[in-house]
Amino acid sequence: MIPTATYRVQFHAGFTFADAAALAPYWAALGISHLYASPIATARQGSTHGYDVIDPTTINPALGGETGFRALVEALRGQGLGVVLDIVPNHVAVGGADNPWWLDVLEKGPASPYARYFDIDWSPADRELQGKVLAPFLGAPYAQALAAGDIALDVEPDLGRLSILAHGAHRFPLRRESYEQVLSAVRVDAVAKIDRQSLAKAYDASALHALLEEQHYRLAWWRTAGDAINWRRFFDITELAGLRIEDPAVFDAVHALPLRLYREGLIDGLRVDHVDGLAQPGAYGRRLRQALQAAAPDKEPWLVVEKILGRGEALSADWGVDGTTGYEVMNEISAVQHDPAGAEPLAALWGAISGRSESFADEERAARREVLTRDFAAQLDAAAAAFHRLARAEIATRDLPLPALRRALVALVVAFTRYRSYAAETGLAPQAALDRAAADEPASAAALAQIGRWLAGDGQFPQSLRTEAIRRFEQLSAPVAAKAVEDTAFYRYGRLLSRNDVGFDPGRFSTSPADFLALAAARGEAFPHGLLTTATHDHKRGEDVRARLAVLSHMPDTWAARARAWLNLAPLGFMDPADAHILHQSILGAWPLELSPDDQSGLTAFADRLTGWQRKALREAKLRTSWTVPDEAYEQACEDYLRDLLTGASPTFRQECADLVAAIAPAGVANSLVQAGLRLTLPGVPDLFQGAEFWDFSLVDPDNRRPVDYAARQAGLMHGRKTVDWRDGATKQTLIKDLLALRRAHPSVFNAPLRPVTLQGRRASQTVAFERHSGSERLLVVAAVGCAPACLASRTPKIAPDWWADTALPDGRPIAELTDGAPFWAAVT
């Protein structure tokens, strides 16, 4: 069954299947068709998200196990609801002592049946790693950890196994060939007879080092990973190892659980995490759809992929999927609510405050180069080596040396504006990126031209070498994009934070209603069942934070004056003014509607939330501090400044901030209602993120994964129509419920294509208007995307009739009479 609306939940030990089952009546009353579940496979103990899977073949017992999941499905089915499941085919969690596949590889090396599951280079350039896995899990340099006793030989009598224990958390099994030596050293004839005391006596640091040299792994300090690792990780996270899902055996093992659940009718579709991390996303999508169809031939699966589309990029139509998870929709709805007139003055403000470039493109290129050469040096080297083997295979290219190819690859990845090229599947070279790279690095033009020919398949060469080179290049460019753009540049660039979020293009400040509708219509035609979202578990800030901050684009001069004044309000110490400006925006955007500037306990709680966000933001930016080399003194100075603003002796900032929030919040609420309305009426499947049916002023995770007050939401759903105060979250919830009811009552019209409606009059360029026809039914939607000035003037989310002036439908009906002051209006006639 294709969903008509989904509701995303994050499962963890604090919110289990049983907790969700109790909410089935509420979700049904709200109007969704499917629960959209975060990964449920067995994850690392204590996981709060489920993406650190250690056993993809079983359901996580911490969530309730298979019995609990079946009970959840039964409760949902009893309310007429289905289930969509998030799966993680790209990686599993490693390190620790809990992943049996990984532990088997450590013990048996290339001979392990699971060695093919991981993307390990068993013959790297580093000869000391021949036939070994680099294990960069030590908390200190190897020699230091060895001398300090942080590495010890251990016995696991219940498993009959000997292993290395590091820092009391990471376990590395010994190869079986080493057992005889150990038994001899402690003078026993069986592992069961060994005790830890005898092992400690027999193996001092020198003997332990000699034993370690014989293993299928080499222990190393965690900081060496980026430069030396010989296996693919998820982004730069050493605790998450990439899987070779293109291998049929790996595909079958990883998908055995979701395919069984689909075959048994327990789930109705899948959401695929990070599809760009896979070797060939298109081939994977087609294979997964075929597997789902084979598992249950009597129904059509629903399959969407997490895919970030770059500017001008469209999802390929031959992947066998129903669409993406909707980041591009989130981006477009945000962009159409920003006033283009605010772009230049806000960029100038940012440049003056930060001393950095006003252009996001400059920030992105710098971040790409830094992240690539610092955090992905080992993967870069492996990709360059793969292209070098390709060059050596033919006389015409044998003079292309390895360093030249490496420099060219750096230039190319830096010049990318997308995640990857898909050359292996399309046979097309990324010509625009190649041209930009050649312009930036003229000395690498010849090497870049040859790389372009290889990517396009132009010439004679061993196909297996080309396939391997392209795979390594694609699986390098994608994580670099993710880490450099979203997890670095987004935290460095502060023109207006509402345009910095997952899947967004901060360099494009706004879009016109006409362009917005053209993209929506094309997307609806190509992928009528793609997901529509405006909030996710990965968002940098909640949808209503972004909606409020977008108001500043309509009042750039007023905001610039206030922003400059705030920088001079309290001493910054040695805090960077750019970091202070980003903080001020975050406080303004996330300030709770009910928070009073003299509520000390409320301000303290707000400061606590912001402190967690700020530390993460500073470290992700990697300018003054980072995760790998934290500057705790700088972080403390920033925290002191934050807490002084919100809880210090002087009330000036918090009073001024509260006053500004009071002034812009009504316009922000109007934007929020428009945002929700568009998500629920555009072609596609609308998704609601947990709790965001009320106002969502969350920040980046873990803030956006705090417990949801479902009691309040259930009460709001019951009494929402009686709400008169727009500050009450039930205002938003009521709109969502009404539109979901409209979708259920008129399913055919919500499956019809979108047609832009050309308005007449003064506000036509500030309004999104469209219709969808099915037979005699017609859905008409009018959304005032540029209404912020009207709401700023009225200090309510309502739009006064005179703002609309002469704006009318093509048949002459005045918009002011049609909408009756609402910023969003939809009806089926």
Image (cartoon, helix red, strand yellow):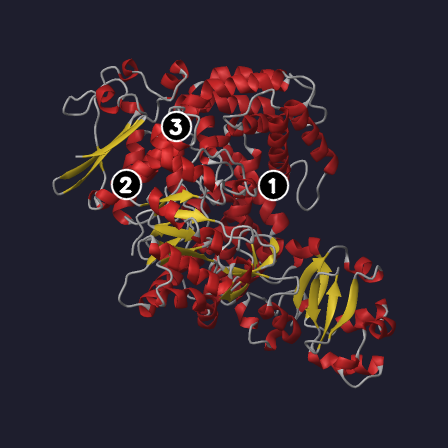
Q: Which callout, 3 or 2, points at the residue further toward the start of the chain?
A: 3
Farthest residue toward the left? 776
Mark 3 and mark 2: Cα distance apart in space: 22 Å
Q: Which quadrant of the structure image shows residue 82? A: bottom left
- The quadrant of the picture occupied by the C terminus is top left
Task: Read off the residue under disc 2.
Answer: 741
Q: Name the amino acid type tagged 2.
A: Ala
Helix, strand or loop status at disc 1: helix
Q: Name the amino acid type tagged 3.
A: Asn
Mark 1 and mark 3: Cα distance apart in space: 29 Å
Q: In the rendering, which numbered label is found on residue 465?
A: none
Look at the image and tell me whether residue 515 can be seen. Answer: yes
Task: Read off the residue under disc 1.
Answer: 620
Task: Read off the residue under disc 3.
Answer: 671
Q: Nearer the viewer, mark 3 or mark 2?
A: 2
Relative depth, front residue between 359 and 196: 196
602, above or below 706, in the image: above
Check whether the beta carbons of the residues at disc 2 and disc 1 lie within 8 A of each other.
no
Q: Which callout, 2 or 1, points at the residue further toward the start of the chain?
A: 1
